[in-house]
Image (tube, grey):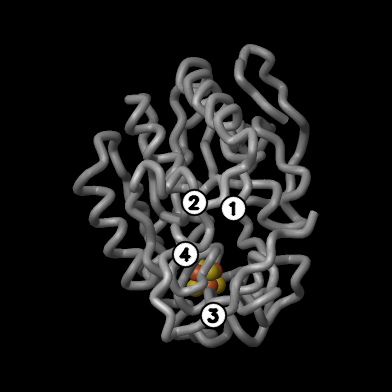
Amino acid sequence: MNSSPMPAANPQQATKATDMHDRPSANFAHKLDQTQALLHSAARDFTPLKQASSLGAEDVVITDLINRLQLPIPVFVLDTGALHAETVALLERLQAFSSTPVEVYQPQRAAVLNFVRHPGQAAIYRSASERQACCQIRKLEPLGRALTGQRAWITGLRRAQSNARAEVQAVQADAQNGVALTKINPLVEWTWGDVWHYIATHQVDYNPLHDQFFPSIGCAPCTRAISLGEDFRAGRWWWENASAKECGLHAPSVQPPAHPTLTGVTS
Ligand code: SF4
């Protein structure tokens, strides 16, 4: 599935992402109802569970819904030590104002320093395996700790984000560190315009990098703005093969929904 082209980057332009992208689908109200029903069902049937937030546009929508619906779902953020200043500032605001708890997981300091010593942080640009080693240290190991003891996790994956995500299901079996759990993707059918319609309508706080043509925001060394006609995830690991733009958090999985007790599920 091809994702929507983005407008050209123009540093002189001070257009807000909400102005650029607020274009809801004709059936947006129905999608929102389905998403809210899925979140209610997940909280009822999958406790303990958490939302994984990158603080990107999709994730701030989900956290806003969790807060508005007063669901007992904590949020966690992986602070890799390499986030943009804008992302760190947004994390502080989220911690200050969210009613649901916001947990922060950081990498093991010794492992980070060992990598910085050898092969050195710049090695991520020279070799896919070194880039993946960095993601293992800064993201995957902390993710494993964040998900310990959980039955499920909630993510902001959408099918339209990339070809690699075209088959994502609203509820799917998953495994992290060999432990089976369930991944719940409440925005799976949302478009980019739907996401920004929700943000604009509910005045959700978002990462200002979205105003600077960063549709997908990760670590600072591995994220850039995109230009006219570029793919949605072109700004992530742009020096690597376009078909493999994942860090391992969302490795392709597995089986379609195995939990018929869930209601409000779209697939
Ligand atoms: S996204 Fe880049 S900086 Fe962040 S963990 Fe992966 S390789 Fe390291």
State yes or no: discs 2 and 1 in contact (Cβ < 8 Å). Answer: yes
Residue topped by disc 2: 196
Residue at which label 3 appears: 9
Quick one: label 3 or label 4, which is nearer the N terminus?
A: 3
For the residue pair 15 and 54, the one nearer the viewer reads as: 15
Residue 260: x percent and y percent? 68, 14
SS at circle 4: helix
Q: Residue at x 39, y 45 (%)?
A: 76
Name the mark on residue 192. 1
The percent coordinates of residue 8 (x first, y second) are 59, 78
Q: Is residue 233 above or below residue 221?
A: above
Disc 4: residue Cβ within 8 A of ligand 1's nearest atom: yes
Determine crowd level at label 2: few under 14, some 14-19, many 20+ residues with C-alpha closer than 10 A: many
Query: How far is disc 3 from disc 4 in space, using C-alphas?
Result: 29 Å
Pointer 4 residue: 138
The answer to whether one can see residue 175 in this image is no
Q: Earlier in the sequence, mark 4 or mark 1?
A: 4
Residue at image x 47%, y 64%?
138
Mark 1: give few (<14), some (14-19) or many (20+) Cα within 10 Å: many
Q: CA distance from mark 1 to mark 3?
A: 17 Å
Q: Report the amino acid beneath label 1.
A: Trp
- Mark closer to the observer (4, 1): 1
**Labelled pair 3, 4 in contact (Cβ < 8 Å):** no
Amino acid type assigned to the residue bearing label 4 in the image:
Arg
Mark pair 2, 1: CA separation = 6 Å
Quadrant position of the C terminus in the picture: top right
**Numbered circles on residues, count:** 4
Whole-percent x, y for residue 95 in the image: 24, 48
